[in-house]
Image (cartoon, helix red, strand yellow):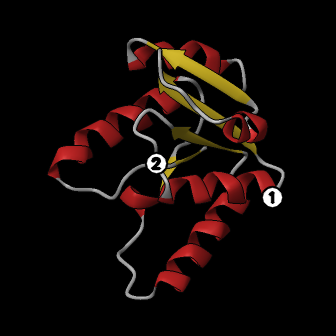
């Protein structure tokens, strides 16, 4: 599962690692571009590499709670490549119909741990 996440910094590192641990707990092999790749000097090379990894994945997971824009490009790529797109978001988050339209599954949660059971049904 390709896990979209903001680029690593001290603030996001633990959150990203925890999210990836939940993906593993659900039965997937996790891959997180922002965690697992080097920095790229060239943005076209970066997006080409992201596309390669999305092509290798069975599905993509994106948390829409914080209204990601750049990471939503990866979700669009996954959809265009015929991959499953899983959207997770805190309950009460509003998402656009276009996001729902590319989603295989939308999981709303109060506590992030609640995503494990629905994810495990996709394995």
At horizontal 42% and vertical 49% (from top left) the residue drawn is 5
Residue 6's spot in the image, x, y percent? Answer: 37, 53
Residue 68 shows which numbered tag?
2
On screen, residue 87 versus residue 102, left or right, reads: left
At horizontal 71% and vertical 18% (from top left) the residue drawn is 121
Question: Could you give the CA–CA distance between mark 2 and mark 1, rounded to whole angstroms?
Answer: 20 Å
Q: Is residue 1 above or below residue 42?
A: above
The one nearer the camera, 120 or 34, is 34
On screen, residue 104 versus residue 46, left or right, reads: right
Q: Is residue 61 above or below residue 52?
A: above
Quarter holding residue 73? bottom right
Tell me the quarter of the image containing the C terminus.
Answer: top right
Mark 2 in CB contact with mark 1 (< 8 angstroms)? no
At horizontal 21% and vertical 55% (from top left) the residue drawn is 9
Residue 69's spot in the image, x, y percent? Answer: 49, 54
At horizontal 40% and vertical 33% (from top left) the residue drawn is 19
Q: Nearer the viewer, mark 2 or mark 1?
A: 2
Residue 20's spot in the image, x, y percent? Answer: 43, 37
Q: Is residue 60 above or below residue 88?
A: below
On screen, residue 8 versus residue 20, left or right, reads: left
Residue 23's spot in the image, x, y percent? Answer: 51, 31
Residue 81 shows which numbered tag?
1
Residue neighbourhood size for the residue with mark 1, other residues' Cα within 10 Å, grouped as few (<14), some (14–19), many (≥20): few
**SS for dot 1:** loop
- Which circle's residue, 2 or 1, is located before the other in the chain? 2
**Residue at the farthest bottom position:** 42
Residue neighbourhood size for the residue with mark 2, other residues' Cα within 10 Å, grouped as few (<14), some (14–19), many (≥20): some
Residue 44 visible, this orientation: yes
**SS for dot 2:** loop
Tell me the quarter of the image containing the N terminus.
Answer: top right
């Amino acid at each position: 599962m390709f896990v979209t996440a903001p680029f690593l910094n001290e603030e996001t590192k633990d959150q990203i690692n925890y999210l990836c641990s939940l993906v593993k707990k659900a039965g997937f092999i996790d891959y997180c571009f922002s965690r697992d790749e080097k920095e790229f000097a060239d943005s076209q090379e970066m997006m080409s590499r992201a596309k390669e990894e999305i092509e290798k994945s069975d599905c993509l997971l994106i948390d829409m709670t914080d209204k990601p824009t750049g990471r939503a490009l990866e979700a669009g790529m996954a959809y265009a490549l015929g991959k499953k797109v899983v959207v997770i978001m805190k309950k009460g988050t509003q998402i656009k119909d276009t996001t729902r339209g590319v989603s295989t599954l939308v999981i709303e949660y109060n506590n992030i741990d609640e995503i494990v059971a629905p994810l495990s049904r996709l394995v």
